[in-house]
Image (tube, rainbow, N blue to C red):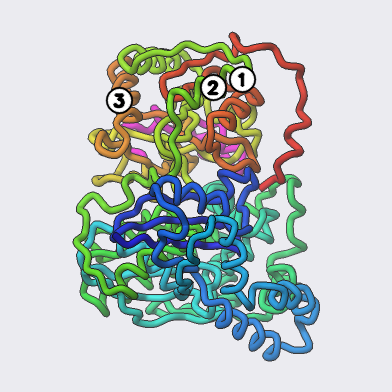
Amino acid sequence: MTNILGVSAYYHDSAAALVRDGRIVAAAQEERFSRKKHDQRFPIHAVRYCLSEGGIALGQVDHVVFYDKPRVKFERLMKTYLAYAPDGFESYACSMPVWLGGKLFMGRLLRRELEPLLGGGRMPPLLFTEHHQAHAASAFFPSPFERASVLCLDGVGEWATTSAWLGEGGRLAPCWQIDFPHSLGLLYSAFTYYAGFKVNSGEYKLMGLAPYGEPAYVDAILENLLDLKPDGTFRLDMEYFNFHTGLTMTSPKFHRLFGGEPRPPESTLTQREMDLARSIQVVTEEVLLRLARTVHAEHRTEHLCLAGGVALNCVANGRVLRESPFKDIWIQPAAGDAGGALGAALAVWHQYLGQGRTADPEDGMRGAFLGPRFTDGDIAATLDAVGAVYRRLDDDALMPAVAELLDGGSVVGWFQGRMEFGPRALGGRSILGDPRNRRMQSVMNLKIKYRESFRPFAPVVMGEHVGDYFDLDRPSPYMLLVADVRKDRRLEMTEEQKKLFGIDKLNVPRSQIPAVTHVDYSARVQTAHRRTNPRYHELLRQFHARTGCPVLVNTSFNVRGEPIVCAPEDAYRCFMRTEMDYLVLENYLLAKADQPAREKDDGWKKEYELD
């Protein structure tokens, strides 16, 4: 039995993963335990969880592997500073103490962090993968494909920002890469920053904002910022950017091109930001489509795997599925840095140890339910400790009762099974609502999530009914594909409504499921399946039996700036702080109206830094 512990840390979204004989045992992000969004610190809590789930001590781990090669990354930083000197001195002065104080000596740093877990045992051998190697391994090895092309796109690893790979069985071969500073991920992040959102956090907001705008700046981007070749390779004009030498993303030349300074965070969104969002989204989709066509022509494969932060752009993924030559695609659900911990562990098993692989037709991620679960006893103890009022119902009574509450317009916190790995709530730690309710989108945004009103919500649909509501003919269990709502489910707009621009489009119902239909008739679809999440699927079945609708609103169980809840106490606290109506913790049902009265206090909102 071979146990491999993968670790990602010190940049953003730290995580740990445990792989045993090639099988994924556990994986979790540190933020879920520390309650600090995008926590970059060493994932000590996530490591403890993975070892506990695996029933082993650290001394029984055969290899610990880190998802990056820090000395190669340091070489890139030094060469970049020298290439642009004397520009970049401020950035150099900020980064050198961090590197010389620990990052450059990563082996020593990791051993020091792991030592408290040894308990007198031996320290496992420490290995390092390349950053994009970890991404590629996380995409291909758990995929359902025996042979596939792999594309990894992110901000930057050591040098690579875009890389192509060919996976066959247990082998994964690098083919080519685009190097820093030419990065599609950093280009998208530059527009995220310019639109007033937080880099490495707000990119999904930019994607959600895009349908409100027009592609007015596409030509400006392609003529000035990006030299895009027919094969999808590209170079950036670095005079428009500042991320390679400074502490911000964009330069004064960028600001002059697009008509002003970056939008201050939390200020009013204007048509400019909406048009910029739409424009960079169009460009990103075009780059990804061209790259997909190129690797298809080079490898002659039927399947494509994707990873890296850019692979979380589910709108672009949907276009690649529909318009590229590939028969099917598979995206790692933890496509960002967190997934690097898992990929690094899988790379050791298959590439370093040379172990073979047989693809699981359903994929090897087990629905991404790789985090902790809690027993009846755990939940009852938590609820009793806070004086909560609850009922315990068996599933036969619970599921139709919750379906009735949802049908009546209630918002329900849903906590069950193992926690999801990756940024999406997939029915383990979710907030649910009725998608037919025209007020549900605004209620959830403003009274539950406390977030910007423009942001759309995603549907979860019974897998066997996905084609009844969406232009999608296959599973989408990880909410990483955007598809259009079927035309026969849409609502016709009046001539006056068709003339609306920007955020004025928000309150126009677009379909029979308006709470999950974006202004361009699209939806970020999750399919629920009996095999990977039977209780979630059963709730949908009960709602379908009652209403004729096999779809629910599914959003993550948290408020803005808070990590998705992990433990029962996190869920109860979030439930009580928001205007959720009911909470389900496994088989325990709680009504807000029954809970002990609490003095109104919004001070808790200061606990979480806005994302």
Q: Which residues are magenta?
A: 485-513
Q: Amino acid at mark 2?
A: Ala
Is label 1 in a helix, a strand or a loop?
A: helix
Looking at the picture, which amino acid does disc 3 mark? Answer: Glu
How far separated are the C-alphas under marks 1 and 3? Answer: 30 Å
The front one of 194 and 461 is 461
- From the image, state whether disc 1 or disc 3 is nearer to you: 1
Q: Residues within 10 Å of mark 3 (few under 14, many from 20)?
A: many
User: Residue 196's spot in the image, x, y percent?
Assistant: 70, 54
The reply to whether residue 272 is visible in this rendering is no
SS state under label 3 = helix
Q: Residue at x 48, y 78 (%)?
A: 228
Label whose residue precedes the other's in the sequence (1 or 3): 1
Q: Compared to 423, does 65 lie above or below?
A: below
Q: Which residue is mark 1?
A: 385
Identify the residue at horizontal 36%, vertical 39% (top origin): 485
In this figure, which residue is indicated by the disc labeled 3?
538
Q: Position of residue 236 (x, y in %)?
A: 57, 79
Q: Which residue is label 2 attached to?
A: 381
Badge 1: residue crowd in 10 Å (few <14, some 14–19, many ≥20): few
Do the numbered discs 1 and 3 sit on residues whose CB atoms are within 8 Å?
no
Left or right of 290: which side holds 382?
Answer: right
